[in-house]
Structure formats: structure tokens, C-alpha cells
Amino acid sequence: MRVATAKESYAADEALFKTDTQKVWFGVLMAGLLLYPFVGSGYWMFLAVLVMINVISTTGLNILTGYTGQVSLGHAAFMAVGAYAVAFFDTRFNTPVLLNLVIAGALSAAIGILVGLPSLRIKGLYLAIATLAASVILHFVFLNWTPVTGGLRGLNVPTATIAGIELATPERLYWLVMPITVVMVLAAKNLFRTRVGRAFIAIRDRDISAEIIGISLFQYKLTSFAISSFYAGVAGGLWAYMFRVVTPESFPGLASIFFLAAVIVGGAGTIIGGLFGAIFMTLVPELLKLVAALVTPFYPDAPIYLAPVRNIVFGLLIVGFLIFEPMGLAEVWRRMRRFFALWPFRT
């Protein structure tokens, strides 16, 4: 235990930020997020917005899988529900952007509750297959419910507009996505200071024991599915405003593997792990593109192999972290913090 961190009250021990150092670093992070648009270029702004959308979605899956122990392979389908909801309501009814995002989250949460019903009878690998089957059914609906989803052609999404300002570029969309990301991550962090969050953890650690002490598995498992799907729906809605077209192929099954890998690589069951995982997994393809560009002068066919190599790298990363660092990047971060807490006096 670090010195001078003992708390004198339960409230202090459960505070969102337990030390002054954490408050300072959070302030630095907020200052960095506010100043970033003034130094970032168009491409880097695009990446920043994409990373934050993935952070929201990964945080949602982390609540379900990392904190509640319910494995889902249908997370991308919930994002698709949110994206289609935003496209439909904005196109048909011209409703406000923020209202569309709330509707996207609510519809995804409702679908998530339905998909989560089998979790009351099955778990583990069987539940993962059930969620995968649900994503296949949803894909069939997206493809064939043409009056609402546009079928194979999909739906075009109007430019997000708030107070008469069109958020047509990543630089402007950043100011919509960034505050929503911060609020949703802090809300997830705060969730696990409440009875609901602790019930999720109890179910993950030992569901039978949790039920014996009075935790309703029916209520809290479905609540976890609803919250996780709400996060995915909002992320999908923001994704729709970013790319402005939604088709049945926008959220393939591989995207669900991507988010599950982000949870594993970042560290399941930790909020900061979801952040690290989403950032890492989003930037890995960009790093591979950079490597391919450097190799191309010597090996012109390098870009052709970029896509399959990316899938191989994702697979190796998942296997590597499961074997050598099962607690993910969050554990690496904790070790670094412990090291520098006493540096240079540590012996």
C-alpha cells in the first residue's frame, strides 16, 4: 500500500478520485482534450473522433463482459441499431441530434434486454453463441426491412447540426463526441460505486452466492445488458454522424471481435482498461499502414497483404495478452504507477 493514502471515512475511500495526484492528472487530461483541436490536423482529428467512439463502445462491453462476466459477441449489432435509429429519425423526422442519440441508446438498450434474456439460463460460451445468433438475426432484419433500413443500399445520414452549426468535419464533430465520451466514461466509473455496480461484480465473481445474498440475477443481468447496449447505441449513433451512411455491412461480426479484443487487451473489469484497449486497437491498423508505407519501396506488394496481416496481428495480440499479461494494459499502467510513486527512492 502506498504511504499517506489511508482514508478516514467510507466516502473518502469510495471517492471518484482518491488522491490529489489523480485530480491533477485528470485536469491535465481535460486540458489536453480541450487543446487538441488547436494542434491536431484533419487526419489526426478523424482518428481522435474514431478513438473516442470506440472508447464509448468498449466501455459498454466492458460493463457487460468485464464487470458482469457475461460474454457477448453481438456488440457490433447493438451499435448498428443505434446507427440505424439515428439515420431513421434524423431523416424522417428531423429530430435534434442529442435526442436522436438518446433514442439510439434507448432502442439499443431495449434490444439488448431481449438478447440478454437467455443469460438467465445459459452463460459462458453458450451465451456468447446466443449473442452471436442474435447479431445474425439483426443483420437479417437490417438487410430485409427495406422501408426502415433501406435494405442493402442502407440509409444516408444528414450532417449533424446543433444550434445552427453544421458538424460536417471531424474538427467540428470532435466538440460533440468528446464531451459525450467524457460524461459516459465518468458515468461508468461512478456506476461501480453504487449498489448496481457492486451487484454486477458479485454476479461476475460468483452468481450463485450473489443470488443467495439477495441479488436478483434476473434484474441485474438484464440491467447490465441494457446499460452495455445503451453505450453501444450511442456509439453507433455517433459513428453514423461521422460516416453519414449506414448499411448492413457497416458493423460486421468482426467488429464485435474487435471490441472484445479491446476489452481483453486493455484489461477486463477496469474502466481505464477499456480506454487503453480502444486506443490501442484503433491505432494498431494505423501503425501497420505506416509500416506498409515504409516497406512498399522495397516490396511493392506490401499494401495487398495489409488487411490479412491486420487480422493476424489482432489474433496474436489477443493470444499474447491472454498468455503473458491477462490483466491487460491496465495492469502495466498500475505497475508503472507503483514504480514512479516511490521513484527515485525505491530500492
Image: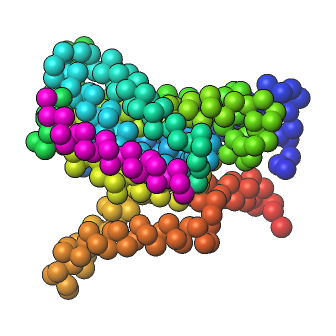
Q: Left or right: where does residue 68 sit relative to residue 55?
A: right
Main SS, magenta residues? helix
Q: Which span is picked out in magenta?
A: 125-147
Q: Quadrant of the C terminus?
A: bottom right
Name the residue rendered at 59%, 39% in the picture: 120
Taking 68 as reference, is 293 above or below it?
A: below
Residue 64 percent across, percent down from the top left: 55, 42
Taking 140 as reference, is 267 above or below it?
A: below
Residue 232 percent across, percent down from the top left: 41, 37
Is 143 covered by the magenta stretch? yes
Q: Left or right: where does residue 11 sit relative to residue 150?
A: right
User: Between 271 and 127, which is closer to the camera in this rendering?
Assistant: 127
User: Between 14 and 229, which is closer to the camera in this rendering?
Assistant: 229
For this orientation, the residue located farthest to the left is 153
Q: How is the image coloured?
A: rainbow
Name the residue rendered at 47%, 58% in the picture: 261
Residue 197, can we see it? Answer: no
Residue 342 percent across, percent down from the top left: 78, 56
Is 6 covered by the magenta stretch? no
Residue 194, can we see it? Answer: yes
Name the residue rendered at 30%, 21% in the picture: 100
Q: Left or right: where does residue 200 sit relative to residue 135?
A: right
For this orientation, the residue located farthest to the front is 121
User: Between 249 and 306, which is closer to the camera in this rendering?
Assistant: 249
Name the residue rendered at 27%, 45% in the picture: 139
Residue 52 percent across, percent down from the top left: 40, 41
